[in-house]
Image (spheres, grey):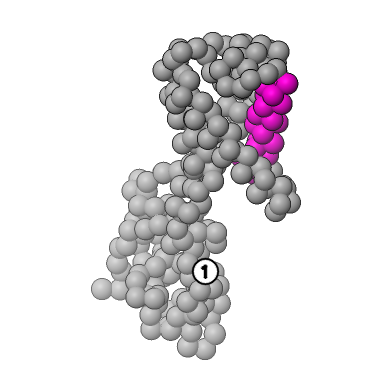
Amino acid sequence: MNIFLRRVKGRSMIPAYLPGAIVLAHRRQAKSGEVVVARQAGREVLKRVESVKGNTVYLVGDNRLESTDSREHGPVKKADVMGVVIAQLPGAERRAVPLRSRIFQMSVLYAALLSTMAVAQLVSFEDFITLLQRYTFNGKETAQLVASLVVTAEVLAIPALLNMALSRLFRRLSLGLAGVVALFWLIIAAVFAGSHPIGLFGEFLVVDGRIEILFAALLASLAFFALFGGRFTRKR
């Protein structure tokens, strides 16, 4: 038959075609700008024709950040183009949020939590220092230094989490501090939570020790995805 159906896999053609969409294709030669079903690198792909030269077709995904196409594998032969997409059947696509977007959303949530913590700690900074001195450090000067470093680290971690325009060095520093802050509070919660408040929100907001442990675990999880989430995204 000259007409056939295919289900879209992957995110390489977002926003034109979402994962799970069903497209109708016609077996004919493709022109530049058309979307085609083709065989490339041993699998069927849905890509847009960027150019046709001689007996080859250069294919690129609309979502170039998440597409593996002729930029990696080179052009395909015209014989490997199975058909040109002529229509999309309604209602079949899965409107899932791309993994990269979900990771960014978690980074933004982490930034919001760090902002809240930093403000709460600064509002009751003297009490925050006293709290640190009580359960971790000997001497007010040492506790004051640690309190200042903790708040500074929380603030400096925010720019990278919000994906602001930063130099490579400062981005690495900011992301590193995001991990250090989460690790610091996770250790403090694991060792001291339950005996008395650990100071996640200074003395501005005192919560149950079990909640503090869960909150510290949440911070650690968000930090993990902010630091390493990009490794879970894969081109398609």
> Which residue is farthest bottom?
54
Rendered location of residue 25, percent (x, y): 36, 66
Query: Dot 1: within a 10 Å radius of its alpha carbon, few (fewer than 14), some, or many (20 or more) residues?
Result: many
Residue 32 seen in the current view: no
**Between 137 and 20, the one nearer to me in the picture:** 137
Q: Amino acid at mark 1?
A: Val
Vertical relation: 170 (above or below) 11: above
Determine which residue is flagged by label 1.
60
Q: Is residue 130 toward the left or the right of residue 194 in the image? A: right
| Left or right of 141 on screen, residue 100 | left
Camera-nearest residue between 3 and 194: 194
- Residue 206 placed where, x, y %? 54, 10
What residue is shown at x 35% (from left), y 62% (from top)? 24
Q: Which quadrant is the N terminus positioned in? A: bottom left
Tell me, yes or no, if residue 132 can be seen here. yes
Q: Is residue 229 above or below residue 3?
A: above
Residue 51 x, y percent position in the rendering? 56, 77
Q: Secondary structure at mark 1?
A: strand
Q: Residue at x 54, y 46 (%)?
A: 227
Q: Tell me the magenta residue range.
A: 141-163
94 or 236: nearer the viewer: 236
**How many labels were placed on the picture?**
1
The answer to whether 73 appears left or right of 79 in the picture is right
Question: Which quadrant of the structure image shows residue 200?
Answer: top right
Look at the image and say whether residue 151 sits in the magenta stretch.
yes
